[in-house]
Image (tube, helix red, strand yellow):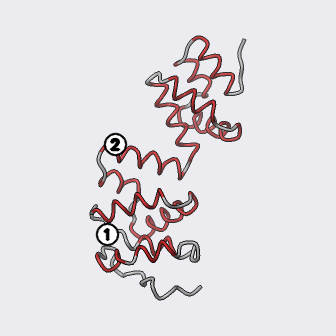
Amino acid sequence: MHLPDKIPAIPDNIHTTLIVHLCIVDVHATIMHLPDKIPVIICSFFTLDGNAEDKLFVINLFGMNSVPYVKRVAEAFQAQTRTHISELIGLYFSKNNKEALLALYECMIDRGSYYANALRHAMTKRDMDTILRIVATTCETDLGRIKNLYNQRYQKTLEEGIDKHASGTTKHILVAFCGNPRN
């Protein structure tokens, strides 16, 4: 596949600055036409110094692209820089922005793992609204995967976690949603 003239070659130095940043608009315009080349090209725009353009790059990466695309960019970025995108988010963003972007990234990369962690976090805080929202709004297939990941990660079933952290009618509703109603 031939790259259009508007897209620069991948620079030798990943710390490239202004000239490469000026071309990002043209790259975003060609994403649909060059799906195999774009992740590597996009990674070349990141200067690894946490400037405003880098922050905008990360925000646009998550906000303007599909989940498979973000996964490919993350893989290409890690291969080129030996740095995980989540590490950069942790370094360059303040607390609220960092938490939001890390949650979004984790959910995009592995939705089941994200929800297993979110359930565990909600259970330790006894946040029944969040637990109910996740369990009640997740499709059966995804809930099965979440239950398996929860079991692997925390060495107990989701139902056991609910049993420990919930009570009364809420506990019975949550356990029923998980597919193991008890008498």
Q: Residues within 10 Å of mark 2 (few under 14, many from 20)?
A: few
Q: Which residue is mark 2?
A: 96
Report the quarter where the N terminus lies.
Answer: bottom right
Q: Residue 20: x, y in percent?
A: 35, 78
Rendered position, 28 above or below 155: below
Q: Quadrant of residue 81?
A: bottom left
Q: Residue 89: x, y in percent?
A: 36, 53
Closer to us: 101 or 181: 101
Question: Residue flagged by tag 2: what amino acid is it?
Answer: Asn
Q: Which residue is mark 1?
A: 47
* Residue at screen point 71% across, 27% down: 179
Counting every numbered tag in the picture gives 2
Rendered position, 153 above or below 31: above
Could you tell me if the residues under marks 2 and 1 are in contact, i.e. CB atoms within 8 Å? no
How far is the residue under mark 2 from the one under mark 1?
23 Å
**Which one is earlier in the sequence, the residue at label 2 or at label 1?**
1
Q: Quadrant of residue 100?
A: top left
Which element is circle 1 on? Answer: loop
Closer to us: 146 or 130: 130
Question: Residue flagged by tag 1: what amino acid is it?
Answer: Thr
11 sits to left or right of 182: left
Report the quarter where the C terminus lies.
Answer: top right
Q: Residue 29: x, y in percent?
A: 50, 74
